[in-house]
């Protein structure tokens, strides 16, 4: 018998693909294919030092928030209310932080 995939499992798998894809993108982004189908690395696109640290922190915090929200949504009715409260706060705070960091 085939086991059915629950919505929680599907969202966890999607999150896994999203965050693993972001990690792979950070590693493979500097690779470029030239017209002769040769692969070379562009030094300007390599993430180094402080940028790499900031990106790793961003990925860690984003993945924790994502999987916490998925867990909250499917835990209890109170967890679902907390989920929507946190999602509302993130929807309001994200543009404000983006405008603050743009300065």
Image (spheres, helix red, strand yellow):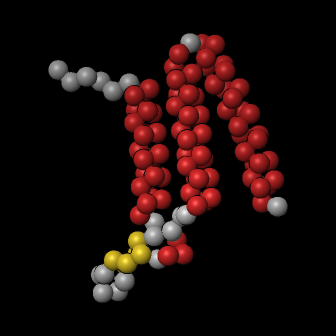
Query: Would you say 60 lies left or right of 8 here?
Result: right
Query: Would you say 90 lies left or right of 6 here?
Result: right
Which residue of the protein is positioned furthest toward the left in this rendering? 1
Q: Where is residue 19 in the image (x, y as percent from the top left)?
A: 47, 45
- Residue at figure coordinates x 33%, y 77% from the top left: 39
Q: Position of residue 44 (x, y in %)?
A: 54, 75
Q: Position of residue 11 (x, y in %)?
A: 45, 33
Which residue of the protein is positioned furthest toward the front in this rendering? 49
**Quadrant housing residue 6:** top left
Query: Would you say 70 lies left or right of 83 here?
Result: left
- Residue at figure coordinates x 60%, y 39% from the top left: 61
Asked if residue 27 is positioned above or below residue 66 in the image, the reply reads below
Asked if residue 14 is positioned above or below residue 35 in the image, the reply reads above
**Quadrant housing residue 27:** bottom left
Query: Would you say 24 lies left or right of 36 here?
Result: right
Give the position of the C terminus as an image quadrant.
bottom right
């Amino acid at each position: 018998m085939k086991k059915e995939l629950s919505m929680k499992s599907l969202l966890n798998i999607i999150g896994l693909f999203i965050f693993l894809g972001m990690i792979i993108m950070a590693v493979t982004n500097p690779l470029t294919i030239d017209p002769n189908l040769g692969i070379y690395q562009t030094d300007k696109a390599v993430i180094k030092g402080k940028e790499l640290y900031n990106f790793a922190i961003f990925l860690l915090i984003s993945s924790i928030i994502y999987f916490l929200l998925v867990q909250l949504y499917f835990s209890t009715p109170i967890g679902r209310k907390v989920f929507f409260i946190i999602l509302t706060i993130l929807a309001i705070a994200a543009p404000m932080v983006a405008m603050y960091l743009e300065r």
